[in-house]
Each structure stands twice: as structure tokens, then as C-alpha cells.
Amino acid sequence: MIRLAWKHLKGRALACAVIAPLMMLVEVLMDLQQPALMARIIDVGVSGRDLTYVLATGFRMVVMAAIGFVGGAACSLLAARAAVDMSGRMRQELFEKVQRLSFAEIDRFQKAKSLPAELGKQFFRLNQKKV
């Protein structure tokens, strides 16, 4: 299954598949900074009654949360783009292969009349396994 997916992961789909986990890493790193910043607000800002430190660190937390949000959204979009491009290539290759079949080969299938519908069902199942 992995070999089949790798074969169809080319061009923009490959770039998206590589960049998507990096965007997730950005989101995770930004989220992991939040507790440490909050601890600093309490330890330094609140205990020292330093309002400027609390506001500056709070602003930093908001900026990091926004960067994390953008990273997570980019990850989702890029992963979806990679999946759509890859499955489109797989579908195209499969339908080209079906078009090259002779009538005698098609007659060997039990569900020859519904071969395109059966292929569509298989792709739907494959996409469900990816999720």
C-alpha cells in the first residue's frame, strides 16, 4: 500500500506531503511554549507586580498562538492537497488501465456492468483508511 501511494506522490503532492508535517511541528512548538510563558507571567510578572512584563508576555503568547493556528491550518490544507492530488493520479491511472481492457477481459469480472462504480467504492474506502 505504501509503495502504491509513494508511486503516485509526485510534484506538488510530494511537496505538500513534506511541508505538511513541518507545519504541524510549528503548531506543536508554539503550543508547547504557552505553559512556560504562563509560568513566567505568574513567577515574574504577578509576583513582582510588573504589569508591563505581564502585558508583553501576554502579547507574545497571543502571537505564538496565532503562529500555531496558521501552522495547523497550513498543515491541514497541505495534507488535503497532497491527498487529493495523489488520489487523482491513482484514479487516472486505474481508469486508463480499465479503458485498455478488452471486452473479453471485462466479461471475466462478475460486476462488469458496474466496474466504474466498484472502482469508485474502492477509492472511497481507500480514502477512508487514510483518514
Image (tube, rainbow, N blue to C red):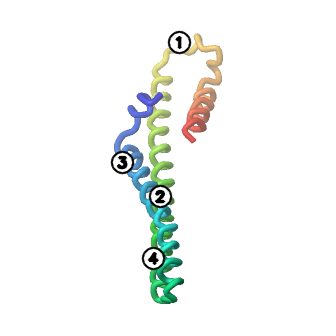
Residue denoted by label 1: 105
Task: Check disc 2 and report its element: helix, strand or loop.
Answer: helix
Image point 45% across, 83% down: which residue?
56
Q: Quadrant of residue 67?
A: bottom left
- Please give the name of the residue rendered at 43% of the width and 29% of the height, measured from the top-left corner: 4
Q: Position of residue 59 (x, y in %)?
A: 48, 80
Decide which of 127, 116 is in the foreground and name it: 127
Q: What's the amino acid at mark 4?
A: Arg
x then y, percent, for residue 126: 56, 33
**Amino acid type of the residue tagged 3 in the rendering:** Ala
Tell me the residue that label 2 is attached to.
28
| First in residue order: circle 4 vs circle 1 | 4
Q: Earlier in the sequence, mark 3 or mark 4?
A: 3
State the residue at coordinates (49%, 38%): 87
Give the SS element for disc 4.
Answer: helix
Q: Residue at x 51, y 72 (%)?
A: 39
Residue denoted by label 4? 60
